[in-house]
Image (cartoon, coloured by chain):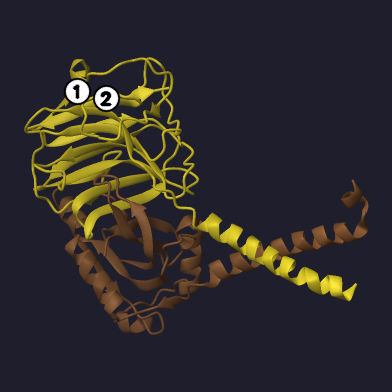
Chain colours: A yellow, B brown
């Protein structure tokens, strides 16, 4: 009996190791999250503000290291200069948080997240204040960029996800979950002419298509 | 069927299951304790934080938690451990990140000069950091976070906790 018990020691030791490895793999399971987009560009020049209302969403983030977000954004003469505002959810978050991001800054890009969003729609805006673009949530200025551009001709209204299975919401006919899309020129806010937002309305939900990995493609790519 | 009816085999299976559970618990304990939390002031890390934030329009004045009155702080504040626990509670994924190399916490007064300038121009700004506010900045070194605008990845996450009441205020990334 004792000999048999001794013979089990390697098996038991292996079991402990297996248990440890299972946990280690679990905490170390960071996938190579992709970046997928769905949304619109709007190319009006000399714009000093971009805003939209975005209704509540709380998608599941299935991949460790993954994210989902929806945002409005102003981009400078190159993609190294931008300011965006919206909501952003990380893997492991119970809900998205209010969020403002800009570049350059913070060693690369500055990303600030604030409290958890509530269930109401919220207005997200980037607008020039003084001589730099700043991020606003519900009309309240949250953070200001380091500048580098004071007008944009590249306004963006987008959803972004690390996984195509993420379901953000929307319907077949109202798949753009944003409303009151506006840009500002001079001192005047003007509602975006949706006739210039090309796209298709064949989706039933706001899933982000797997093939659409380049945000600089003029397309609306919500698919089921 | 023979195996199921044999108590020796059942004992072996039970032992294996117990060992797996012990292994899981050991792994979890080691993972949660592998990074010591350290308060720092007037260190290269603290100075780097101060200088970096200054470039983004933030004013961070470190306070020695052991001698707060030296910095003019007379109010009571939560401990470093309590601040870190609060940050861990709000954002549990950071402490579990496989890229985590250390957690540090800095006590200090934080305000945002850019928002102050905007407020002076009549803008409606977030009042949270208009005046110097006593905070703990809990830093998760090495934690990778996707940057939405550039498709890059940062390697430091900072959670800002109100030092007087433990309220979560915000979090921000850094790339070093």
**As drawn, B14 above or below A140:** below
Q: Which mark is residue A180?
A: 2
Q: Tell me the quarter of the picture where residue B144 sits.
A: bottom left
Q: Which mark is residue A191?
A: 1
- Earlier in the chain: of badge 2 and badge 1, it is 2
Classed neighbour count for the residue bearing mark 2: other residues with Cα under 10 Å, few (<14), some (14–19), many (≥20):
few
Picture coordinates of residue A57 (x, y %)? 43, 34
Q: Foreground: B63 or B75?
A: B63
Picture coordinates of residue B173 (x, y %)? 31, 58
Picture coordinates of residue A19 (x, y %)? 65, 61
Task: Report the Cα–Cα distance between label 2 and label 1.
Answer: 6 Å
Residue drawn 29% across the image and 37% down it? A71
**As drawn, B45 above or below A18:** below
Determine the chain carrying the residue at label 2: A
Image quarter in which the C terminus of chain A is found = top left
- Check contact, mark 2 vs mark 1: CB within 8 A: yes
């Amino acid at each position: 009996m004792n000999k048999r018990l001794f013979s089990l020691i390697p098996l038991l030791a292996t079991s402990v190791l297996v248990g440890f490895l299972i946990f280690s793999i679990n905490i170390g399971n960071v996938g190579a999250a992709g970046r997928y987009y769905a949304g619109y560009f709007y190319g009006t020049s000399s714009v000093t503000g971009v805003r939209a209302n975005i209704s509540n969403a709380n998608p599941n983030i299935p991949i460790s290291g993954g994210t989902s977000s929806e945002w409005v954004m102003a981009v400078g003469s190159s993609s190294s200069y931008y300011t965006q505002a919206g909501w952003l959810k990380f893997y492991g978050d119970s809900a998205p948080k209010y969020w403002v991001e800009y570049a350059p800054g913070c060693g690369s890009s500055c990303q600030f997240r604030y409290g958890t969003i509530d269930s109401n729609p919220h207005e997200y805006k980037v607008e020039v204040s003084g001589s730099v673009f700043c991020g606003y949530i519900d009309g309240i200025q949250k953070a200001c960029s380091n500048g580098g551009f004071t007008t944009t001709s590249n306004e963006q209204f987008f959803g972004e996800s690390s996984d195509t299975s993420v379901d953000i919401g929307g319907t077949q006919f109202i798949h753009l979950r944003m409303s009151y899309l506006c840009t500002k020129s001079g001192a005047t806010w003007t509602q975006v002419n949706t006739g210039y937002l090309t796209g298709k309305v064949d989706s039933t939900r706001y899933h982000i298509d797997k093939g659409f990995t380049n945000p600089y493609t003029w397309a609306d790519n919500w698919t089921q | 069927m023979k195996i199921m009816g044999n108590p020796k085999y059942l004992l072996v299976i039970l032992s294996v299951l117990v060992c797996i559970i012990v292994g899981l618990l050991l792994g979890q304990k080691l993972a949660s304790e592998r990074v010591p939390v350290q308060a720092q002031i007037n260190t290269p890390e603290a100075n780097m934080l101060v200088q970096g934030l200054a470039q983004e329009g933030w004013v961070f004045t470190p306070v020695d938690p052991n001698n707060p009155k030296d910095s003019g702080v007379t109010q009571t504040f939560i401990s470093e451990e309590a601040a870190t626990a609060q940050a861990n509670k709000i954002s549990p994924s950071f402490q579990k990140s496989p890229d985590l190399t250390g957690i540090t916490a800095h006590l200090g007064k934080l305000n945002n000069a850019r928002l102050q300038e905007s407020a002076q121009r009549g803008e409606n700004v977030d009042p949270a950091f208009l005046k110097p506010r006593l905070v703990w900045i809990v830093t998760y070194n090495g934690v990778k976070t996707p940057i939405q605008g550039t498709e890059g990845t940062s390697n430091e996450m900072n959670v800002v906790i109100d030092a007087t009441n433990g309220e979560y205020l915000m979090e921000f990334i850094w790339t070093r």
